[in-house]
Image: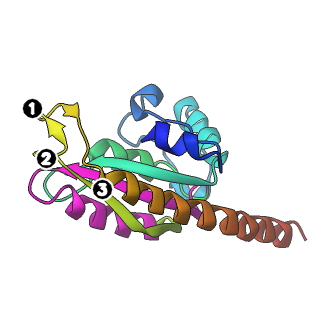
Amino acid sequence: MLEQATARGDAAYELLDLADFALPHLDEPMPPSMGRYEFEHTKKWSDTIDDFDGFVFVTPEYNRAPSGVLKNALDYLYAEWNDKAAGIVSYGAAASGLRAAEALRLILGELQIADVRQSVGLSLIHDFENFTTFTPGPQHAQHLGVQLDQLVAWSTALRGVRSTKAALAAA
């Protein structure tokens, strides 16, 4: 998916692996909405997320929900997520992770992240050989292309929203 996104040339795409940030269960003493972070792991996460205009969240479906690791990472921050766009790629067994994607949309809404309409749902049965080797069907490239079109448009538009809010706050 990163290869397809990068080949487009319409935006800079980067892979963030949550394992690289080693975020423990949310441990900040103050609510994230206050933006007063005590721990270095939170400050590093905040600086990283603040630099992006949009995201494609990739999540498995566990018990009809996104992964706990993703939920924890989202919970760490608030303002850094606001007025940005997101696409969702989910994977799972029977429903291709779509229930996790729908649950994730509710969380993104609370964080003021605008999720685009097009999702990509991958089946562990049909899109992974032996449940491990990624062998996606050809339709997913088209779905991802539409999602990225929407994501670039929304991310670009929301950059203006963030700039306007910053100017108003500074006035």
Give, as a three-letter code, the residue at label 3: Gln
**Residue 88 magenta-highlighted:** yes
* Image color mode: rainbow
Q: Is residue 83 visible?
A: no
To which residue does mark 1 refer? Answer: 130
On-image quarter of the N terminus: top left
Indicate yes or no whether the magenta region holds residue 6. Answer: no
Q: Secondary structure at mark 1?
A: loop
Location of residue 115 in the rendering, given as x and y in whole percent from the top left corner: 46, 67
Q: Is residue 99 left or right of residue 140?
A: left
Q: Which tag is nearer the camera, tag 3 or tag 2?
A: 3
User: Given the image, on which type of amino acid does mark 2 rest?
Assistant: His
Does residue 82 appear to the left or right of 108 in the view shown?
right
Report crowding for label 2: few under 14, some 14 to 19, many 20 or more residues within 10 A (C-alpha): some
Out of 35 and 69, give the one closest to the viewer.
69
SS label for mark 3 = helix
Q: Which residue is mark 3?
A: 139
* Relative height, residue 50 to residue 150 (above, below): above
Q: Distance between the Cα atoms at labels 3 and 2?
A: 12 Å
**Magenta residues, start to end:** 80-109
Q: Which residue is mark 2?
A: 126
Q: Is residue 113 left or right of residue 58?
A: right
